[in-house]
Amino acid sequence: MRTQVGIIGAGPSGLLLSQWLHLHGIESVILENRTREYCENRIRAGVLEHDVADLLVHLGAGERMKREGLVHSGIYLRFRGRDHRIDFANLTGGKTITVYSQHDIVKDLIAARLQAGGKLFFEVQDVSVHGLDSSQPSIRYTRNGRPEQLECDFIAGCDGFHGVSRPSIPAGVLKTHENVYPYAWLGILAQVAPSCDELVYASHERGFALLSMRTPQISRLYLQCAPDEDLNAWSDERIWKELQLRCATHGDWTLKEGPVLQKGITAMRSFLVEPMQYGRLFLLGDAAHIVPPTGAKGLNLAAADVHVLVRALEAFYKHGRQDLLARYSEVCLRRIWKAQRFSWWMTTTLHRSPEGDFVNQIHLADLDYVTSSRAASTALAENYVGLPYD
Ligand code: RFL
Ligand code: PHB
């Protein structure tokens, strides 16, 4: 089989890329090693930057998001038992964020791809990439037990942090940057209406807590925990008790409790490789970079990489230009480093640090400053709703 762009992975990066290329008349094939059901039900991110929500509409996959997504124009930072609202719309000239589940985006994009006759193969095995430094790279894989080969002009490695693309780049080409945090998140999905109209990021001496949501009936909540936390030690009752303690306020606000539908531990790391390209292989999304979830940036960064690659491929196919492809990594990384900085800042400032009292007091002073200075609030708001692409 032959195509223009061979895409490995049917997560947000691969699906957004394939759908966007299709709108520009560029052909692609997606190879995914999991089942469609698995991809459509993997619970992950929930917050879309302003421009990413607009992108889904532009790609013809935004109808359900427009109906069911929750548009928020701010967040709350809660510390010393009081709420401080960061008013995004007011600070950024009307920008908002949309709360809509990543797995729903994946569902909507898969449906859009299939409706447009897109080629999307699930449950392929043994994916490997070849001829990356030639002009005709290929992807080999096994489908229904038979070995197959996809010849392409370019390969997009959209296969996440544990995929095959990044490790296929020869040793010595990539420079890795990494930071591991001394805490993790215990996250639950609960069948209860959100207790707040917008997300609450709570800094407390017992540790960080986050109140988020998925729908008007389903809440998503997180607690800072140890990186090696034993999930079995956390009964539903203990989780709610801890959330109540960390989210307590001086006002008459209460945290509503409900049945826990799912729980899990999320590790925290910052990771990126430079460059994000080797020959005709381009890395996108989690295959190239990971941010800790406190800034809600992971999925949004994947969309930004797609934006840069689509523009470069369009220039290549329409005008024979190679310069944008050559600059892919440099253009992506400038914005990614800013998102890395923001995610690191949100994470370190809001979590309780094992480094001790001095550092934790500095973080509280930082929160105090951010919520009392318009300039500092604006900096947070601009980063949260998403920095410009160019
Ligand atoms: P994905 O979603 O991991 O998709 C990669 C796809 O590639 C497939 N794959 C392979 N296919 C074929 N052959 C192989 N050898 C393969 N190896 C892997 C996988 O099965 C999968 O389908 O990467 P992508 O597309 O780059 O998307 C990145 C996002 O998923 C990720 O950044 C976000 O989920 C991060 N994230 C958040 N991001 C936000 O923007 N806002 C948030 O609020 C937010 N919250 C979160 C998050 C991530 C979390 N976890 C669990 C990692 C909350 C959590 C808890
Ligand atoms: C979520 O709803 O899963 C979520 C929201 C905000 C974050 C991270 C995760 O910063």
Image: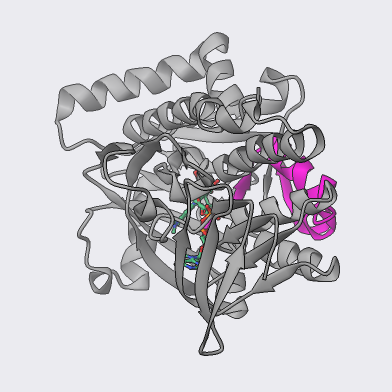
In the image, residue 32 lies in the stretch drawn in magenta? no
Where residue 136 appears, as percent x and y from the top left, is: 58, 53
In the image, residue 62 lies in the stretch drawn in magenta? yes
Q: Quadrant of residue 230?
A: bottom left
Q: How is the image coloured?
A: one colour
On the picture, is 104 further left or further right than 256? right
Whether 290 is drawn above or below 361: the answer is below
Q: Quadrant of residue 30?
A: bottom right
Which one is in front, 305 or 105?
Answer: 305
Q: Residue at x 47, y 46 (%)?
A: 133
Q: Which residues are magenta?
A: 43-71
Where residue 375 appears, as percent x and y from the top left, is: 55, 9
Residue 100 visible (yes or no): no
- Quarter of the image for the C terminus: give it: top right
On the picture, is 11 further left or further right than 91? left
Which one is in front, 56 or 312?
Answer: 312
